[in-house]
Image (tube, grey):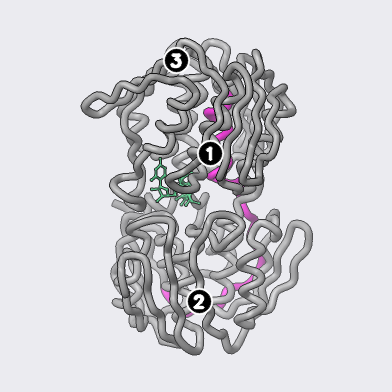
C-alpha cells in the first residue's frame, strides 16, 4: 500500500491548474452509449475512476482511442451487450451510470449492485434509480447480487424525485428518457452544473431536454441521438479544495482553468469569514489571511454548500477564531475523518452522525492517518500541510482516484510531500 508523507507547516505559493471534472467525465463516458456515432471527449482528468469507466465501456464492445493525455475518441457502434462485468462494475460507484444508457439502447441491462467508497447510507443505495427506471416502463428483477432491467419499450412519464434529490439518479433518468417514447417530466431534480453541461451536449446531438439545471425537466423522446465533441468542464471540487487549502495554510496561490461561479457559495462564505480573494472568469487568487472567523455550514444540493467541500472546510474551521457547527445532511459516514483531525490536535466534538462542532484556532500536529474517502483524503492533506511535524496518510488510492497527480501539483506549490510505496 502506498502512502503520502507530508512535512509541515509550510506556506504554499505559485499557481495550480484545475483538471477536468471527475463528476462530469463519469457521466459523458457512459452517455456515449446513447449514440452509434463517434464522440471525442477532451479535458479528461487522468484519474483511476475515468480509467475504470473507459475499461468498462471497452468491455461492452466500444472502440476507444486515446488521442492524447486528455482526449479520447469513442466509437460505440459495436457495443454488443448489455451486461456489466461485475468485477469491473463493483470497483466504482459511477458504474451505475451505464445502466440508463444501456437500458435505453438495448431495452434491457444486467448489473451488480455498484461498489465505491464508504460514504452514503447502506453502501450507496440505488432505489431512486430503480423507481425512475420503472416509471419509464422497465421491469426490475433483483437477484442475489445483481439487477436485471427489461423494457419492451420505454415510455415517457411524469416522475417526482420524492425520496431525495440525487445527482446521478437525475442524470440517469434524464439520459434514459431521451430515447423513451413520448414526453417525460422530471420534478425535484438535482441542479449541479455537470447536469446542464451533459444536457447541453445531448441537445446539440438531437436530444430534446428542457430545464436542465432547474428543479423541473421536460424531455421529448427522440429516435436517435448523434455524437460530436464534449469538453469536460473544470472540476469545481478541485477548485474549492485548493482555495480552502490556500486559506487554511495562509498561502497566496493562483488557481487557473477554473470557473469561480461554480463555487459561489464558498466564495460568499470567504467574504464573511475574512478570506481575501480576487476572481476572474477562469482564475481565482487567494491571499493570506491573518484571522479567520468561524461560520456555520449545512451541506445542501447545488447551489448550496457542496458535501464534497465539507471535509476541507471543516479543516479550515480548526483555524478559525471561535466555534463552528458543521451539519452534513447529504451523506452518512462523511464525518469519519473528524477523529483523525482530533488526533492531530483539533478541538472537535462529533454531536451525532451528521453534526460536529469545531473550536479554533488550534495548532495541528503531524500523525499517522488513514483516508476514509476521497474528499476526507484531500482534507487530511490540507490539515497535514498546516500541521507541525510529519504526517503519514495511507489508503491514498482513494485520493488519487479523484485528484490527478496531486503530489506533483502540490510539490509545484512548494509543499513537502512524498508518495512512498
Ligand atoms: C454525486 O454522487 C457525486 N458523484 C458525489 O461526489 C457527490 O458527493 C454527490 O453527487 C452529492 O453532490 C458523482 O457524480 C459520480 P446523490 P451521487 O445520489 O449522485 C442517497 C465525490 O467525492 N441516495 O446525490 O451518488 C445517497 O446515499 C463524490 O466526487 C439514495 O438513497 O450522490 C446520498 O445519501 C462523492 N438512493 C444522497 O442520496 C439512491 O438511489 C445523495 O446522493 C441514490 C442516492
Residue 219 x/y as whole percent: 65, 28
- 342 relative position to 27: left or right: left
Disc 1 under 8 Å from ligand 1? The reply is yes
Q: Secondary structure at mark 3?
A: loop
Query: Is there any visible trace of residue 246 in the rendered image?
Result: yes
Say which residue appears at 32% left-offset and 50% top-offset: 121
The residue singled out by tag 1 in the image is 170
Q: Are marks 1 and 3 in contact (CB under 8 Å)?
A: no
Q: Does the magenta segment cover residue 239?
A: no
Q: Is residue 392 above or below residue 54?
A: below
Q: Secondary structure at mark 2?
A: loop
The residue singled out by tag 3 in the image is 151
* Number of on-image labels: 3
Say which residue appears at 40% left-offset and 61% top-offset: 376
The residue singled out by tag 2 in the image is 296
Where are the magenta residues, as a range? Answer: 7-32
Residue 403 x/y as whole percent: 50, 52
Q: Secondary structure at mark 1?
A: helix
Give 99 or 383, whichever is nearer the viewer: 99
Give 190 or 77, whichever is nearer the viewer: 190
Residue 362 x/y as whole percent: 41, 87
- 118 relative position to 277: left or right: left
Amino acid at each position: 500500500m502506498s502512502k503520502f508523507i507530508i512535512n509541515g507547516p509550510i506556506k504554499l505559493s505559485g499557481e495550480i491548474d484545475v483538471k477536468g471534472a471527475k463528476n462530469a467525465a463519469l457521466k459523458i463516458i457512459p452517455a456515449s452509449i446513447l449514440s452509434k456515432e463517434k464522440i471525442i471527449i477532451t479535458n479528461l482528468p487522468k484519474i483511476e475512476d475515468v480509467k475504470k469507466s473507459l475499461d468498462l465501456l471497452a468491455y461492452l464492445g466500444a472502440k476507444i482511442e486515446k488521442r492524447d493525455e486528455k482526449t479520447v475518441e469513442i466509437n460505440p457502434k459495436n457495443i454488443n451487450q448489455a451486461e456489466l462485468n461485475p468485477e469491473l462494475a463493483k470497483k466504482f460507484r459511477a458504474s451505475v451510470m451505464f445502466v440508463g444508457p444501456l437500458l435505453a439502447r438495448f431495452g434491457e441491462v444486467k448489473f451488480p449492485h455498484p461498489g465505491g467508497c464508504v460514504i452514503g447510507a447502506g453502501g450507496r443505495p440505488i432505489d431512486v434509480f430503480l423507481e425512475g427506471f420503472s416509471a419509464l416502463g422497465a421491469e426490475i428483477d433483483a437477484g442475489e447480487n445483481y439487477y436485471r432491467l427489461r423494457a419492451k419499450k420505454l415510455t415517457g412519464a411524469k416522475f417526482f424525485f420524492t425520496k431525495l434529490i440525487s445527482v446521478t439518479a437525475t442524470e440517469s433518468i434524464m439520459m434514459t428518457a431521451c430515447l423513451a417514447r413520448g414526453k417525460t417530466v422530471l420534478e425535484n431534480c438535482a441542479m449541479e452544473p455537470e447536469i446542464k453541461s451533459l444536457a447541453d451536449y445531448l441537445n446539440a446531438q438531437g436530444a430534446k431536454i428542457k430545464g436542465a439545471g432547474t428543479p423541473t425537466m421536460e424531455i421529448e423522446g427522440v429516435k436517435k441521438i448523434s455524437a460530436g465533441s464534449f469538453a469536460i468542464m473544470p472540476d469545481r471540487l478541485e477548485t474549492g479544495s485548493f482555495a480552502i487549502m490556500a486559506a487554511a495554510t495562509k498561502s497566496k496561490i493562483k488557481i487557473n482553468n477554473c470557473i469561480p461561479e461554480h463555487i459561489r457559495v464558498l466564495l460568499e462564505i470567504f467574504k464573511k469569514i475574512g478570506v481575501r480573494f480576487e476572481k476572474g472568469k477562469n482564475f481565482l487568487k487567494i491571499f493570506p489571511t491573518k484571522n479567520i472567523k468561524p461560520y456555520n455550514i449545512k451541506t445542501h444540493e447545488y447551489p448550496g454548500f457542496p458535501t464534497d467541500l465539507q471535509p476541507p472546510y471543516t479543516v479550515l474551521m480548526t483555524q478559525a477564531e471561535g466555534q463552528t457547527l458543521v451539519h452534513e445532511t447529504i451523506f452518512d459516514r462523511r464525518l469519519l475523518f473528524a477523529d483523525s483531525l482530533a488526533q492531530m490536535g483539533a478541538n472537535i466534538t462529533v454531536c451525532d452522525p451528521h453534526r460536529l462542532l469545531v473550536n479554533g484556532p488550534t495548532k495541528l500536529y503531524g500523525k499517522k492517518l488513514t483516508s476514509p474517502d476521497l474528499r476526507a483524503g484531500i482534507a487530511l492533506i490540507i490539515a497535514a500541510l498546516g500541521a507541525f511535524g510529519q504526517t503519514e496518510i495511507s489508503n491514498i488510492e482513494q485520493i488519487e482516484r479523484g485528484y490527478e497527480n496531486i503530489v506533483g501539483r502540490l510539490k509545484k506549490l512548494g509543499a513537502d510531500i512524498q508518495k512512498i510505496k
